[in-house]
């Protein structure tokens, strides 16, 4: 039976900030340029006054080779942004407009 609980955020974004040493076989999202992207995401969320959007840095999300990765809940949509413009599009379309950016969606399979 699903629980009908009040939600703190309309969207909650989790961003992998994992850093591993150079040469590590798994690599890391940080080594693939994640931090400047997450900084931009934070600036955009703050700048637009999106108080109903939460953002948190995480450790490894488990799909390092696909990084840098972020996931947006409650939809559970995974993104692999590559540029600042990708971040801007995710903010405008998904976090403001509730429309996922299909071209940046990652379909992850185990
Ligand atoms: S280091 Fe980001 S998913 Fe593993």
Image (spheres, rainbow, N blue to C red):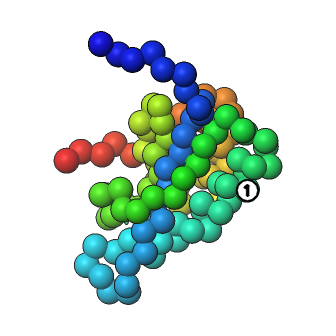
- Residue 68 or 20: which is nearer the viewer? 20
The residue drawn where x is 60% and y is 60% is: 38
Q: Which residue is mark 1?
A: 43
Residue furthest out toward the left? 110
- Furthest residue toward top: 1
Q: Nearer the viewer, residue 79 or 4?
A: 4
Give residue 93's position: percent from left, percent from top. 64, 35
Please give the name of the residue rendered at 52% of the width and 66% of the height, measured from the top-left corner.
Answer: 34
Looking at the picture, does residue 55 appear above or below residue 59? above
Describe residue 50's horizontal placement relative to residue 6 as left or right.
right
What's the residue at 47%, 72% (across, down)? Answer: 30
Q: Is residue 83 above or below residue 26?
A: above
Residue 10, quarter of the rendered image: top right
Give the total of numbered labels. 1
* Crowd tier of the residue under label 1, counting other residues whose Cα lies within 10 Å: few below 14, some 14–19, many 20 or above: few
User: Residue 12: where, in percent of width, then height?
Assistant: 54, 40
Query: From the image, which quarter does the N terminus lie in?
Result: top left
Q: Nearer the viewer, residue 71 or 5?
A: 5
Above or below — where is 68 with respect to 28?
A: above
Q: In this rendering, does residue 85 appear at all?
A: no
Residue 80 location (% of width, % of height): 46, 54
Name the secondary structure under disc 1: helix
> Is 28 on the left or on the right of 72, as rendered?
left
Quarter-wise, where is residue 50 in the image? Answer: top right
Which residue is the extreme one toward the bottom?
22
Identify whether 71 is placed above or below 39. above
Image location (x, y in percent) of residue 15: 50, 55
Q: Residue at x 60, y 62 (%)?
A: 37
């Amino acid at each position: 039976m699903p629980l009908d609980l009040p939600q703190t955020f309309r969207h909650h974004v989790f961003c992998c900030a994992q850093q591993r040493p150079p040469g590590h076989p798994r690599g890391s999202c940080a080594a693939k340029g994640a931090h400047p992207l997450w900084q931009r995401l934070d600036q955009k969320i703050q700048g637009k006054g999106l108080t109903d959007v939460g953002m948190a840095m995480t450790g490894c999300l488990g799909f390092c080779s696909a990084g840098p990765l972020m996931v947006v809940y409650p939809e559970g949509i995974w993104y692999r942004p590559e540029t600042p413009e990708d971040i801007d599009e995710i903010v405008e379309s998904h976090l403001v407009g509730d429309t996922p950016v299909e071209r940046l969606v990652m379909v992850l399979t185990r």
